Image: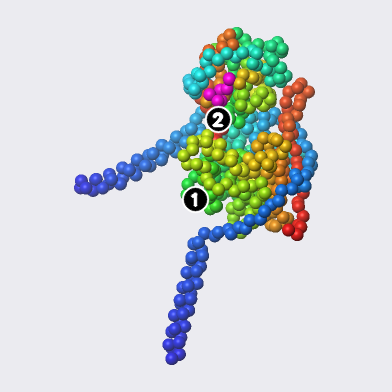
Amino acid sequence: MNSRIRLILWFAVPFVLAMAALATTRSWLVSVKSAPQRVVSSLPAHNASAIVGHTLSVADLIEAQSRAPIAEQGLTVPDSAVVILLGGVGCSADQVKLLRYWSEQHAETDLQDHPIVAIYADPMLGIEQGAYESLLLRRVSQAKFPFLVSKDPDFNPRAMGIRTPQVVLAESQVITHVLDLPADFRPPALQ
Amino acid sequence: MNRHVLSVLDRLASASRLLILLVIVVAGCRPEEQESHIIRSPVVPFDELFTVADTVRLDPSVIIGTVGFLDVNAQGEFLVSDHVGRGIHRFSPSGGHVRSYSVPDCLPDEANFIPMSSRLLSSGGIMTMEFWGTTVIFDANGNCVEATRLLDSFSRAFCEYQGSIYVHRVYVEGKATMGVYSPALEAIDDLEIEPPRLVRLNQVRGGLWGTGVACFADGPYYVYLESMDGLAARIGSSITQYQPEFFEIRPDDLSKEADVSERSMQSRDYPLTISIFALDESTRMVVTAYLDENWHIDSSEATSSLGLSIASNTGRFPGRSTISPIPPRAAGNGYFYAAGENEQLPNGDVGNPVIVRYRFIPPEHTDE
């Protein structure tokens, strides 16, 4: 009797465990794809704390459309601002969705008193490409805040392993906080 | 005596039948091999093979971020998959907006859907796919009629042939196959195809999104990164392989010991075949990037000089190749289509990109 039970356990337990593992994997795959969208979550911004303390120098910023220094355009980075950091479109998560969120729902956030600025910071792509992609993102998102491009070769979130977009709080042109991203922001599937 | 002869003949007949049966069985079990022969494809000037036909302005009322993937049908309609705006838009041959398709309207929890590849179907509908994920079919009236959150775990490109969907898969291990699906997204068959010669190379890079397979009158053709020409998925299709002058055969796979970034660097040491397009029902165009600098146009960057190799599946004309400064995004009806510059709007803002059509000029047979 004991040997029969042992025999059953010998075959049945691994089989049941294997089936359970398969079912769990499958349900995880399905749940990952079908999880309901959450607009804001407490997901920590991956790796992004490395940019805290960086100064967004006005001298290194140009306006995307005119390609002119922002000082010449009568623009500046406000003393306390929400800054949306953008990067290579092909390498990023849904930047348009994030821009739309801050454009349309800014008033409903705790940061409604802080002006918003979008800064394209991806020196690997160059100024011209950065300006071009900024204009595309502005057009598609229809966001109304200023779109700037960083000329600072040392401000390179992508090279620092930081995925764009990121949303930060800048006080006196210094990045002081990294704000959380919605949970379902993810880059395109890699091929 | 006669009885003995008859008996021997009977035995011989039985043995013959057995032998024939054995030959049939062995032949049937042996996988059919495509014995291809290789022909050099000389490089000719771009304007000897292509000429600009016209420029199509897409309806400016539709805001397009980028032409991420482009498809064209026999009627000349365009289907634009916008990877920035995440929209799918159908345009008439003259650029008029026909219809836009929304996957989240069909699957509300797929708000992040990226239309990596969308193609116009012969039924009048469309199919859109996010590789390794959601696939949706819309009918001719724009209604969402079929949807699945995971059609094929390893999909990398698809095309339609005789009403079925052929899905080219990333090679994982073991058999290389192409999935065949009905218009209702039911799995019909797994078509065995040639595996890649360089497995690690194809794991590191994937070519141009969604363009690794194209369907012709004689079936689907596909490419791997090390391919010198398109490979026919169906036995009996064209087996002549053309080797363009700019194509160098990569002798070995990427180093097993190298890390991902090193492999990525190594992958550019030789030309990479990134796309195959159907210029028409029997003319294939294979696109190769990372050409040797001797082939670069002027002193432009490696990625802006592409090798195009054009061949007929039916031997209608001799194979020719050229260097193109323009990356093709779609093909059909004897043209290839490229995304041109973005229009400049009166307020200085950028508008939609224009679509530029290049007409193919078939080479003539000469004594070679």
Q: Residues within 10 Å of mark 2 (few under 14, many from 20)?
A: some
Picture residue at 66% right of the left edge, 23% below the top? A127
Q: Farthest residue toward the left? A: A1
Quadrant containing the C terminus of chain B is: bottom right
- Whole-percent x and y of residue B362? 76, 51
Depth check: B43 or A65 in front?
A: B43
Picture residue at 46% right of the left edge, 39% below the top? B257
Callouts 2 and 1 in the same chain:
no
Q: Please name the predominant secondary structure of the magenta segment in the image.
A: loop
- Whole-percent x and y of residue B104? 59, 32
Report if the CB atoms under discs 2 and 1 are less than 8 Å apart. no
| Image position of B12 with respect to B307: above or below | below
A33 horizontally vs A19: left or right: right
Label 2, secondary structure: give it: loop
**Residue holding disc 1:** B175
- Whole-percent x and y of residue B46? 75, 44
Depth check: A189 or B104 in front?
A: A189
Picture residue at 23% right of the left edge, 48% below the top? A4
B138 inside magenta stretch: no
**Residue holding disc 2:** A187
Q: Chain letter for mark 2, please.
A: A
The label shown at residue B84 is none
**Amino acid type at image mark 2:** Pro
B67 horizontally vs B14: left or right: right
Quadrant containing the N terminus of chain B is: bottom left
- Whole-percent x and y of residue B347? 76, 21
The stretch of residues the image draws in magenta is A154-160
Picture residue at 49% right of the left edge, 50% below the top? B175
**Amino acid type at image mark 1:** Lys
Q: Farthest residue toward the front? A: B294
Q: Chain letter for mark 1, please.
A: B
Does residue B184 appear anywhere in the picture? no
